[in-house]
Amino acid sequence: MTAGVGERAADAELAGRFRRDPQEFTTVHDRYFRDIYRYVAGRLDEQAAEDIAAETFLLAFDQRDRFDAERGGLRPWLFGIATNLVARHRRKEARHYRALARLGPEPAAEGPESRIVASVAAGRLRPSLARALAGLTQGERDVLLLVALGQLGYEEVAQALGISPGTVGSRLSRARAKLHDVLDQEAING
């Protein structure tokens, strides 16, 4: 929607007011926040939309002296700021996911996105993983699950099962090899 002559004049008059009195910028916020929020929410999730919509108005307030009514209205100016912030958010998010991918299977910081990715991957691999776990001996399965789910060290697993740490190591090694074989086969067939 293109800003009409009346809207541009109103925006120019409002810009003059908020340049003299920064409190007048609340009118800009009240008038356009909902539109900016809806736009950003259509491109990102609701939490990011709230943050980016708020940041849009913070940036616009900081740059209010640069607004030029001759170039267009407040609404498109705000949408331009929001679009740039959405792009920056997506670049930051992409860098974050690339960094998580480089970390491998055990990310240093367990954030909500890490749990979501793990959950989706686990859901997709669940049938194959269940078959692979079923193919392990009871001893191998106990050791693997105590290490993976219980996050116990070899000594702790040995104590829990009443076996030597060396036996823990050999059972875990055999379990991992069997799991790798099954999951590698799944990757070839999948």
Image (cartoon, rainbow, N blue to C red):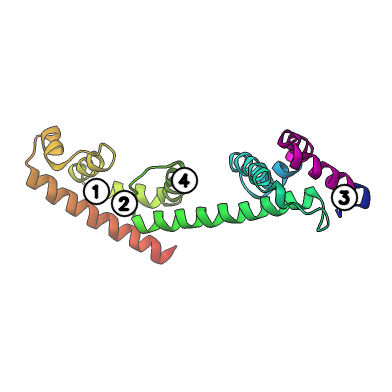
Q: Residue sitting at 24 percent across and 48 percent down?
A: 136
Q: Which residue is mark 4?
A: 113
Label 2: how many residues lie within 10 Å, few (<14), some (14-19) or many (20+)? some
Q: CA distance from mark 2 to mark 1?
A: 7 Å
176 relative to 165, above or below: below
Q: Which residue is mark 2?
A: 132
Q: CA distance from mark 2 to mark 4?
A: 27 Å
Image x and y of residue 54, in percent: 64, 40
Q: CA distance from mark 1 to mark 3?
A: 73 Å
Q: Which residues are magenta?
A: 8-33
Q: In the image, what residue type sits under mark 1?
A: Leu
Predominant SS of the magenta segment: helix
Residue extending farthest to the right is 6
Q: Which of the two discs, 1 and 4, labels the residue nearer the N terminus?
A: 4
Q: Which residue is mark 3?
A: 8
User: Which numbered disc, 1 or 3, marks the residue closer to the eye?
Assistant: 3
Q: Which of the two discs, 3 and 4, labels the residue nearer the N terminus?
A: 3
